[in-house]
Image (spheres, helix red, strand yellow):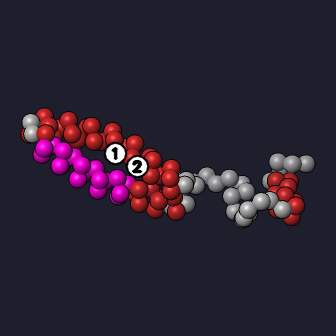
Amino acid sequence: METHKRSMVKSITWRIIGVFLLGGIVWSVTKDWKEMSIITILFHSIRMVLYYFHERIWLRVKWGKILHPLAELEVNGKLTPEDLDEIRARLRAMGYLE
């Protein structure tokens, strides 16, 4: 699972690459810095937001994911002795502990 912050940083870094690529293409066609800036900023602002939500939606899709054997174990906050016993029991059942 990814944090919202990680998804946002990935989106921004990907858009930076795209800004230079599209900016270069638009400038080579138009030779107009103002037009290039408007097109590039508008396009990439929209794409950055769409990419963020695309990533967040795909995080909910279980298809193609390999889950950790203990992924379904719900633990909130600090582990209690009961949590640790449950983890050990599951690891024994899976053959990881003797």
Q: Quadrant of residue 86?
A: bottom right
Residue at the image position 35 percent from the left and 57 percent from the top: 49
Residue 50 rendering spot, x and y as whole percentages: 35, 58
Using a 10 Å C-alpha cutoff, classify the residue at mark 1 as few (fewer than 14 neighbours), some (14 to 19) or many (20 or more). Answer: some
Using a 10 Å C-alpha cutoff, classify the residue at mark 2 as few (fewer than 14 neighbours), some (14 to 19) or many (20 or more). Answer: some
55 left or right, relative to 32: right
Q: Which residues are magenta?
A: 34-51
- Which residue is denoted by mark 1 in the rendering? 15
Out of 51 and 65, give the one closest to the viewer. 51
Amino acid carrying mark 2 in the image: Ser
Query: From this viewpoint, is residue 49 visible?
Result: yes
Residue at the image position 44 percent from the left and 52 percent from the top: 8
Amino acid carrying mark 1 in the image: Arg
66 left or right, relative to 70: left
- Which residue is denoted by mark 2 in the rendering? 11
Residue 59 rendering spot, x and y as whole percentages: 51, 58
Residue 31 rendering spot, x and y as whole percentages: 9, 36
Residue 54 rendering spot, x and y as whole percentages: 41, 58
Secondary structure of residue under mark 1: helix
Q: CA distance from mark 2 to mark 1?
A: 6 Å
